[in-house]
Amino acid sequence: MKVVQIEAPGKINIVDKEIPKRNKDEALLKIKYCGICGSDVAAYTGNQPFATYPRIPGHEFSAEIVEIDDNEDGLQEGMLVTAIPYFNCETCYPCQKGKRNCCENNETMGVQRDGSFSEYITMPVKRIIKAQGLSAQELALIEPFSISYHASKRVDMREGKKVLVIGAGAIGLFALISAKMKNAEVYVCDVYGHRLEYAKKLGAHGVINAHHEDVKEKVMAITNQNGMDIVMEAVGLPETFLNAIEWTSFGGQIVLIGNGKRHTEFNHSVILKKELDIFGSRNSTEEMRELVELVKAHDIKVTDIVSDIVDFKDSIDAFEKLKNNDGTTMKVLIKFSE
């Protein structure tokens, strides 16, 4: 079979590997679609803080079950599925507390263990999620949606709250959708006008172009000079974290979704002065199963964020395009099979 492999930062190839043999309680899956996550691009460029090499990237995918034993979940050969890509140890302190998403020994596909950019993979049966009528493209978007949905549950997201999403990439747009699902009043900030058009299409109450507008001035005008109740930071830069602190109201909340390697220096007294609640958000829990049902029940147009669908053989070009993204490329799906 063919797989995409990042040999080292900046070096990516399509290579041949043996089709994996499944173990007991595993299924053999044939990949349909894979999404390229920002963390995959970061692994390619050497900016993913948790990545090791060589590594097959990918953890956003849909697949068909090729081989599986009888199981209590009713999963059968030929079924369309996705799967939870985080592997936790079950024994560390957070796992024992039920916080498996922040397992001390977590291994995420495409980061600490090989991922889904492969024609075939094996997965533990207990991690596999039925399609419930969703398409292969929709299923490949459930995992990135779950990241933002989990973050929205970390804060007091509800009707009447004014929310600012910093960053209109895929995770930021899913943060917008997640906040709107809680009936919040949501605004989106980015430096790329093209991305902000996606935010408008997805129902943002307003957008702010940080390249052309004074964001603080706009935020204060929107909030009657109070600042935002909640800021969802989906970029991962020191500057955007500091902006989040500045643009949040006294007594407000910040949830950090964006990931990066750069250090941030700031005077922590402003956090005390404003009595801010600042939350980290890592991975998701069982939100993927929940979202499959929600997307189907509420006809959520998750594929509206997809800008490109490319064939597997062109996946290296897709990585390169995203590395040099000028804001016109949003979510890219790689098609592996019909």
Image (tube, rainbow, N blue to C red):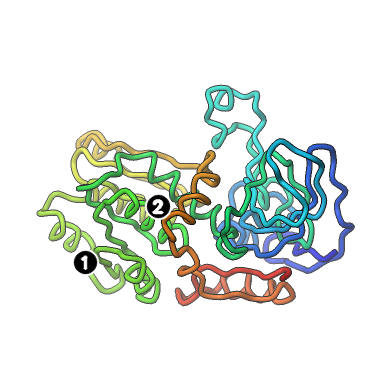
Q: Dividing the picture into quarters, in which one does residue 54 lie?
A: bottom right
Question: Depth check: 72 or 320 in front?
Answer: 72
The amino acid type, in three-letter code, at marker 2 is Pro
Mark 2 vs mark 1: in front:
1
In the image, residue 111 sits, relative to residue 316, either above or below, namely above
The amino acid type, in three-letter code, at marker 1 is Asp
Is residue 46 shown left or right of residue 278? right
Question: Quick one: SS at disc 1?
Answer: loop
Q: Dividing the picture into quarters, in which one does residue 105 lie?
A: top right
Is residue 129 shown left or right of residue 298? right
The image shows residue 256 at horizontal and vertical percentages of: 40, 46
Q: Residue at x 49, y 56 (%)?
A: 296
Q: Residue at x 66, y 54 (%)?
A: 81
Q: Residue at x 80, y 55 (%)?
A: 66
Q: Residue at label 2? A: 238
In the image, residue 337 sits, relative to residue 283, either above or below, namely below
Disc on res. 214: 1
Q: Earlier in the sequence, mark 2 or mark 1?
A: 1
The image shows residue 247 at horizontal and vertical percentages of: 24, 52
The image shows residue 257 at horizontal and vertical percentages of: 44, 49
User: Does residue 203 appear anywhere in the picture?
Assistant: yes
Q: CA distance from mark 2 to mark 1?
A: 18 Å
Assess disc 1: are there few (<14), some (14-19) or many (≥20) residues with their C-alpha within 10 Å of its C-alpha.
few
User: Does residue 42 appear anywhere in the picture?
Assistant: no
In the image, residue 309 sits, relative to residue 97, either above or below, namely below
